[in-house]
Image (cartoon, rainbow, N blue to C red):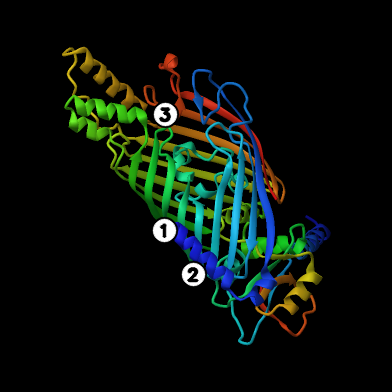
């Protein structure tokens, strides 16, 4: 379907009169880069891939964007990103055609980013937000800044002094559904969502909805467990481990920005039909004060994840095979995240020039013992108290 | 306090008040035909990438210019760093691009003069060609 839409848009673009095209045809390059270093105060666990030794490779990246205007209504854009982090592959993160028939309508088709949160489609463009590390409780879930192949429609309008921005998107996505101690490889067929933004004077409101309708499990680990449970007659339990249902995400954000200060918050609620991935509620609230080219900011953030409802119904001591199956149920269930975490972050951003900023920040993290709390805890440190501090410094550049 | 000291106090107070009087910026447009009336909020929306019934295309003066600072302060109401980070977000998510930028006040006047349906800003008191109309003056 997407191929046909893209082909149709390209054909339309090429047949648009060249008289218009000649005056607007041009190719422009721009880009951004970030160098971010960080260290965690503990050696018992890691957090956002940082551990007790200083590392500059987790979030640093370089990106180049090319925009080619075919005529005054059609353009093609590509954005390639080189990552140094272990979780991300380098490559073309954006590749899309834009059709903009007027200043109030915009249609995009191709490889795009999911815009569920305020910064989820620009999470790599650190220059666009105050922190070095956007609040993990809300922004960590890889799904929310994944690329998708699909279409996106945007409409802007204004009523008196209120600006409205409405956006709808639909597409497919292939990748990991959740971050946690383990990633589970899944395909997502059909993802759709909508965003409504309002701006009035310095105030902004944003609400966003996203629905993943179908998850297809490619995880060998899950497949083996489901196979084992089914052949042993535990069909009900097997059904609970099947990653074949949907997920809904609701986001609400609000903010106010003036010459001297800003306040901004987003809350997110994830409702899952998957038995293994229970619901998550999270939010952050940031206040910042501008002082000349300096920005001082503080953020509180929280996430609460419900315990999943899977009850291990396999009786123990009946046979060694059932005992093994029961242990597998417990150990695989333990791999699913239970991300309860509170944090307090203080940071400073210095805009050295209009395209270069330096940042420093510290986050105090307080999780819950026995839960994943967004930490990676090796089995030998299971009694780690889930408390740590993350120190980061970095620079953000756009060109 | 002697009368003399009091007089000095009053005079210096008046001088301070005069010195601190706000510098004003005029928002001007090259209108096609019909007159246009825009509020500060509407002008802000136009310069921040919003749409407007007036269909005017914004033009800004490059950063580093004093009049840009005055305009950002009294019309947009945001610090320069916030405006730059906003445009980085718009540009790299394919949403929008910042307004066309010119180097200085003279370039702004000639750009507006040559481009119908454009809107820009200038220091108060600058002589305007007949094609340009003042839309808004800051307090």
Q: Position of residue A73 (x, y in %)?
A: 58, 69
Residue A274 in the image, given as x and y percentages of width and height: 29, 39
Dot 3 falls on which chain? A
Residue located 59% across and 63% down the image: A75
Does the rendering let one see residue A336? Answer: no
Viewer-side residue, B71 vs B120: B120
* Element assignment for label 3: loop
- Work out whether residue B87 or residue B16 is closer to the camera in this orientation and state it: B87
| B119 to B84, vertically: above or below | below
User: Which quadrant holds residue A81?
Assistant: top right
* Residue that carries the numbered disc 1 in the rendered image: A1
Seen at 53% across and 70% down, the residue is A12
Nearest to N terminus: mark 2 or mark 1: 1
Residue topped by disc 2: A157
Extreme residue toward the bottom, this view? B33
Q: Chain of mark 1?
A: A
Q: Is residue A245 above or below residue B84?
A: above
| Mark 2 to mark 3 CA distance (whole Å) | 43 Å
Give the crowd class for mark 3: few <14, some 14-19, many >=20 residues within 10 Å.
some
Foreground pick, A115 / A100? A100
Q: Helix, strand, or loop for circle 1?
A: loop
Judge whether A147 appears above or below A229 on screen. Answer: below
Which quarter of the picture shows residue B101? Answer: bottom right
Q: Is residue A286 left or right of residue A279?
A: right
- Per the image, the residue denoted by label 3 is A182
Label 1 or label 3, whichever lies nearer to me, is 1
A312 left or right of A153 in image: left
On screen, residue A307 versus residue A151, left or right, reads: left
């Amino acid at each position: 379907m997407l191929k046909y839409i893209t082909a149709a848009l390209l054909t339309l673009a090429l047949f648009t009169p060249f008289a218009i095209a000649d005056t607007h045809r041009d190719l422009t390059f721009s880009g951004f880069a970030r160098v971010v270093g960080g260290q965690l105060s503990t050696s018992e666990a890691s957090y956002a891939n940082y551990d007790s030794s200083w590392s500059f490779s987790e979030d640093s990246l370089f990106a180049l964007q090319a925009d080619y205007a075919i005529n005054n209504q059609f353009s093609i854009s590509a954005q390639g990103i080189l990552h140094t982090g272990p979780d991300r592959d380098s490559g073309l993160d954006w590749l899309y055609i834009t059709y903009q028939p007027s200043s109030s309508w915009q249609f995009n088709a191709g490889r795009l980013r999911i815009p569920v949160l305020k910064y989820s489609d620009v999470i790599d463009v650190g220059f666009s937000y105050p922190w070095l590390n956007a609040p993990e409780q809300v922004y960590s879930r890889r799904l929310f800044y994944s690329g998708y192949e699909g279409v996106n429609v945007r409409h802007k309008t204004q009523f008196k002094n209120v600006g409205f921005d409405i956006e709808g998107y639909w597409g497919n996505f292939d990748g990991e559904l959740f971050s946690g101690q383990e990633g589970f490889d899944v395909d997502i067929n059909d993802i759709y969502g909508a965003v409504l933004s309002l701006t009035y004077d310095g105030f902004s409101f944003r609400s966003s909805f996203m629905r993943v309708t179908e998850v297809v499990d490619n995880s060998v680990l899950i497949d083996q467990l489901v196979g084992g449970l089914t052949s042993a007659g535990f069909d009900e339990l097997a059904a609970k481990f099947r990653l074949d249902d949907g997920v809904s995400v609701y986001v609400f954000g609000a903010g106010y920005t003036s010459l001297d200060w800003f306040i901004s918050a987003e809350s997110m609620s994830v409702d899952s039909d998957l038995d293994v991935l229970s619901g998550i509620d999270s939010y952050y609230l940031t206040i910042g004060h501008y002082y000349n080219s300096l920005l001082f900011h503080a953020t509180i953030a929280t996430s609460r994840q419900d315990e999943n409802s899977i009850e291990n119904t396999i009786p123990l001591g009946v046979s060694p095979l059932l005992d093994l199956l029961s242990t597998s149920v417990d150990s695989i269930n333990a791999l699913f995240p239970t991300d309860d975490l509170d944090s307090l972050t203080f940071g400073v951003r210095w805009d050295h020039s209009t395209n270069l900023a330096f940042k420093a920040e510290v986050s105090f993290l307080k999780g819950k013992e026995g839960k994943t709390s967004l930490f990676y805890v090796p089995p030998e440190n299971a009694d780690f108290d889930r408390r740590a501090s993350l120190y980061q410094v970095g620079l953000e550049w756009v060109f | 306090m002697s009368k003399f000291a009091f007089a000095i106090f009053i005079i210096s107070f008046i001088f301070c008040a005069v010195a601190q009087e706000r510098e004003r910026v005029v928002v001007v447009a090259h209108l096609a035909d019909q007159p246009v009336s825009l509020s500060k909020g509407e002008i802000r929306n136009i310069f921040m990438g919003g749409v407007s019934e007036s269909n005017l295309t914004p033009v800004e003066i490059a950063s580093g210019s004093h009049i840009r600072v005055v305009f950002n302060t009294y019309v947009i109401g945001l610090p320069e760093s916030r405006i730059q980070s906003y445009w980085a977000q718009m540009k790299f998510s394919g949403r929008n691009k910042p307004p066309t930028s010119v180097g200085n006040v003279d370039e702004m006047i000639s750009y507006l003069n040559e481009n119908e349906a454009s809107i820009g800003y200038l220091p108060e008191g600058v002589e305007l060609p007949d094609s340009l109309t003042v839309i808004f003056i800051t307090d």
